[in-house]
Amino acid sequence: IKMNQRRWETWVPKDTTCFPGFGLVDVAGKSVTSRSDAVGCALCTPGHSSSALLDDIGRTYACKSCEPGSYQELSGETLCISCPVGRIAGEAGLSQCEACPPGSFANSVGLEVCQICGTGSLEWTTSRKVELHGSEHWIQVEAAVSGDYCHCIPGYFLDKDQTCRQCTEGASCPGSNQVK
């Protein structure tokens, strides 16, 4: 065996030969991206994915933070997932995407910021019409998926300049951008 050490040595996994779902870690257990800084392997945590590295020793894996606009909620995964419409990830390493708050929307996957409705003033919201016991109501919508949900809040209407204006006395402004 000693005479063939060079041959069998390559067959024996090193402590820094990580498998998919795992990544290189240093003495403190923190993720590193270089085998020279590593002492072993650990399961990749939520907000990270396991990515292949190839060096002079061979293939190993490192845990990398999910890019802004993507997330990973599970441990030991090899891919990050783009945030769905209506949700965003504004920074790297998130385990969940955040819903766009009322008054904003995300109309495509993988976004880092929500798009603001209108001028962004407090009179803008995201809402949709519902019927309750035969009458029409407008309810606020979180995680809106398009600008079609952008409306003025109840008590305001949308003028020609695309500005939400306070409803005039005696009129009804239910939140549909219209004056009734």
Image: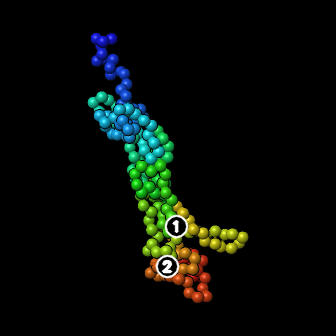
Can residue 5 be seen at all in this image of the molecule? yes
- The quarter in which the N terminus is drawn is top left
Question: First in sequence: mark 2 or mark 1?
Answer: 1
Residue found 45% across the figure and 68% down from its top: 116
Name the residue carrying label 1: 102
Name the residue carrying label 2: 164
Image location of residue 134, percent across then percent down: 71, 72
Of residue 129 and residue 156, the one placed in the foreground of this image is: 156
> As shown in the figure, which amino acid type bears the numbered disc 2?
Cys
> As shown in the figure, which amino acid type bears the numbered disc 1?
Pro
Please tell me in which quadrant of the rendered image residue 20 appears.
top left
Q: Give the CA distance from mark 2 to mark 1.
A: 15 Å
Image location of residue 172, percent across then percent down: 61, 82
- The quarter in which the C terminus is drawn is bottom right
Of residue 51 and residue 176, the one placed in the foreground of this image is: 51
Colouring of the image: rainbow
